Amino acid sequence: MNIREFCNGIHLQKEAAELVHAYSADSNTYKEVKDRFYNDYEAFTRMIAEQKDAAAWFLYYFVHFSCEAHEEYVKRGLSDQLYWDTFSDLTIWCENCRRDYGVTGLMEYDWLWRHVKLRLFRLGRLQFELYNAPHGIEVPGISIAAGEMLLNVHIPQGSPADPAACEEAFRLARAMFPEYHYFHCESWMLYPGLAAVMKETANTILFQKRFLIYETEEEERDAEKRIFQKVLDNPEDYPADTPFRQRVRTWLIQGHKLGNASGIFYME
């Protein structure tokens, strides 16, 4: 897999692809950075974050490491379709970097290592991460011990979380990982308070109903960032340019919150 083929395969923006080709690290530096990436990830992020063009360098290295990950896909007998679907996430986060920071590159470095290290895969509409439960989880009918391996579910931005598409994604995950039956998710989309601003038939509510919620985080504000693309101190400053945004804005002005929640479910 070469850099040009990779950039074309994930439909990386032209400006971002040109940046990757414009940057270059000598072989000794590349080897040092790669060693830190795989053996001391915090040292890797510090090393790159301290550079003047951090976003550009993060993009450079993630593209190169992602290309090299293709060899491991081949060794494991994983399809090219799975590879391209999974690494298309770099294009999404590159777009978000431009939107949020005004520069071309990547700043979601605490997330994208999962793709390169083959811990996360996109199957249809959803992403699934091999995930060790950080603590015990107890809900009616389910008891998970700390450290037990689960499939952590992520909902990448893009198309709606159509119920049929999500059902197909879960089916694909069960086929790929037949030894795992528990699906875990931590997301603003699981927050019970969303029922106050969404219809019962909304895709988000239908997705939420799959899970047994065991924990909520009231102070998290991911919902606001996803809905409004930013987080503001005063909810009155949020736009009300759609009926949904109007409802959310009013809800927040009234003093309510839209936090995160964690849930789990079992699938045969």
Image (cartoon, rainbow, N blue to C red):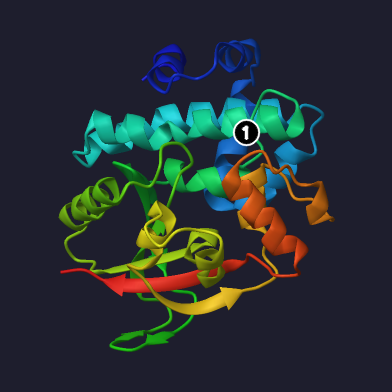
Res. 44 visible in picture: no
Q: Quadrant of residue 50?
A: top right
| Whole-percent x, y for residue 224 in the image | 66, 53
Query: What's the residue at 24%, 53% (across, down)?
Result: 167
62 w.r.t. 197: above or below: above
Q: Element under label 1?
A: helix
Q: Amino acid at mark 1?
A: Asn
In the picture, measured across the screen, residue 101 lies left or right of residue 82, that is right
Q: Quadrant of residue 73?
A: top left
Q: Quadrant of the N terminus?
A: top left
2 w.r.t. 245: above or below: above
29 w.r.t. 218: above or below: above
Query: What's the residue at 82%, 29% (across, down)?
Result: 52
Question: Front-most of 161 and 39?
Answer: 161
Q: Quadrant of the C terminus?
A: bottom left
Q: Quadrant of residue 230?
A: top right
| Whole-percent x, y for residue 36 in the image | 60, 45
Mark 1 highlights which residue?
A: 96
Question: Front-most of 11 and 45?
Answer: 11
- Sort mark 1 into few (<14), some (14-19) or many (20+) by Cα contacts within 10 Å: some
Query: What's the residue at 64%, 11% (across, down)?
Result: 22
In the picture, measured across the screen, residue 150 lies left or right of residue 263, that is left
Callout count: 1
Res. 219 visible in picture: yes
Question: Front-most of 240 and 107?
Answer: 240
